[in-house]
Amino acid sequence: MLAELLETAGYEAVTAHDGDEGLERFREKQPDLVVLDVMMPRRDGIATLVTLREQSQVPVIMLTAMGEQSDRILGLEIGADDYLAKPFAPRELLLRIAAILRRHVPEEESTSSDVIEIGPLTVRPSRHEASLGGEELTLTGAEMRILAELALRHGDVVSRERLTRHALGRALTPLDRALDTHMSHLRRKLGAVARDDQRCEIRSVRGAGYRLIID
């Protein structure tokens, strides 16, 4: 059913019945985006995502059961770009896929003209590369888009609405905590490589958004 939906929308869909088969098909086909169901047999979606992230930063959307917040948070923490709770409207899935693909620039199309350099921080969004003080940052697609958006406006407050729209490709809703999870993970990664004589932090501005501070 999902494959039919995607093919009707003009995508070429490759399906797998479990996580092991999914990883094999991924290596064979190298798709532009992966939709993972948490409840897959044999190797579930979470375990599949862990293995997938060891070999690729391909965009991933997780499908989770309604109300399973722990699955959604865990999926985002280990590298999913977005999630959708079942049951979902087919149009919503298609919109999220389209939004992520618009923001994912393949490496062969990348250029060196979009480098963002602020002190020790260097971000190359189209090449999916970022470093702090010469130390490489390993980021998911969503984390890279968040960091790039903050870096472009470093020192200024960037609203949650703007970050959600630019990084996740959708409007912010009252119960949507995906941005918070991505932000927490990004902060940990920046803190892990920052030297004592560097300051590169993302500050929360209550009721307004986030600000990137670099000294």
Image: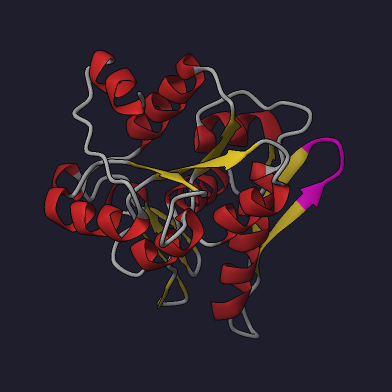
Foreground: 175 or 117? 175
Which residue: 77% across, 33% down? 175
Picture coordinates of residue 77 (x, y %)?
59, 59
Q: Is residue 53 visible?
A: yes
Q: Is residue 212 visible?
A: no
Q: Residue furthest right?
A: 206
Q: Nearer the viewer, residue 58 or 198?
A: 58
Q: Quadrant of residue 12?
A: top left
Give the colour scheme of this rendering. Answer: secondary structure
Answer with left or right where residue 197 lies relative to residue 15: right
Looking at the rendering, in which quadrant would you find the C terminus? bottom right
- Could you tell whether 76 is left or right of 69 in the image? left
Task: Kindly identify the residue that appears in the image at 42 percent across and 62 percent down.
Answer: 43
**Magenta stretch, main secondary structure class:** loop
Comparing 48 with 176, the one in front is 48
Which image quarter: residue 41? bottom left
Q: Which residues are magenta?
A: 204-208
Residue 187, magenta (yes or no)? no
Q: In this rendering, is residue 178 above or below 10?
A: below
x, y percentage for residue 105?
Answer: 27, 40
| Left/right of residue 189 with respect to residue 115 in the rendered view | right
Above or below, 196 against 24 in this view is below
Residue 153 image point, x, y percent: 57, 42
